Amino acid sequence: MQTILIIEDEEPIRELIKLNLSLVGYKTLEAGDGNEGLKLIKNEKIDLVLLDLMLPGIDGFEILPELIKKKIPTIILTARDGLKDKVKGLEMGADDYITKPFEAIELLARVKAVLRRSGKDNSVIVFDNIEIHLEQHKVFKDGQEVELTYKEFELLRLLAENMGMVMSREKLLQLVWDYDYEGYTRTVDMHIQRLRNKLGTDKIKTIYKVGYRLEA
């Protein structure tokens, strides 16, 4: 389980980020100002930092060199109009940035991408007696491989990487099939049913009139 440090002085934003990260299995640490964040960086094992730049006490730009020295991947949190801050942060060595406000799915995708690039991602996702081997593109149940089509695997991977979150049919259709036409959402339903049958699981829940959620 990777540990992600959230350094953000706005408590509602910090708590929302913590909730979304926790739902998909990340361990989180929190800091409401730069001094507290720097202390955690020095004393805890951290896999990634979400760093607001405008902080009380020590600001994000002062924290970045310590993160780079310790080779901790960093995603900058910045206001929508903070172009200069984005550029400066990236030039100093940050790995990515995300502008506020942001959607949970974008945040989680960027976190996953940075962890993957830095070699800190989990290549295997486990729930119940099912293992999803992302790099090998294979799924095992009770140690036995389950044969899935490419689309079935991608659908399961997407649900697993967003475990605990509701994914709409339209979003799943767009991300797995690259469709944006509502009439094709029946395709998602059919593939979900096949996944349930092949995996013998009741953890893929239907959320009425919305979509699906994979429960931990």
Image (spheres, grey):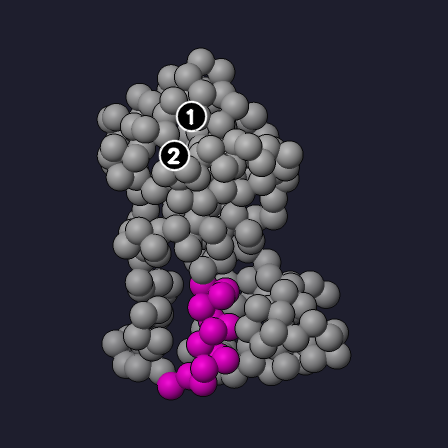
Specify start and end residues of the magenta stretch as a single range.
147-160
Residue at the location (28% across, 54% down)? 119
Q: Is residue 10 above or below residue 176?
A: above
Q: Residues within 10 Å of mark 2 (few under 14, many from 20)?
A: few
Q: Is residue 153 magenta?
A: yes
Q: Which residue is mark 1?
A: 61
Distance from Cα at disc 2 to Cα at disc 1: 8 Å
Q: Please name whichever residue, 6 or 203, is drawn nearer the observer in this view of the structure.
A: 6
**At which x and y percent is residue 152?**
48, 79
Dominant SS of magenta comes to helix
Question: Do callouts 2 and 1 mark residues in contact (Cβ within 8 Å)?
Answer: yes
Asked if 57 appears above or below 16 in the picture, the reply is above
Q: Residue at x 70, y 80 (%)?
A: 184
- Residue 37 in view, yes or no: no
User: Viewer-proximal residue, 163 or 48?
Assistant: 48
Tell me: 161 left or right of 145. Answer: right
Quick one: SS at disc 1? helix
| Dot 1 alpha-carbon crowd within 10 angstroms: few under 14, some 14 to 19, many 20 or more | some
Residue sitting at 61 percent across and 74 percent down? 178
The x and y percentages for residue 181 are 73, 75
The numbered mark at residue 92 is 2
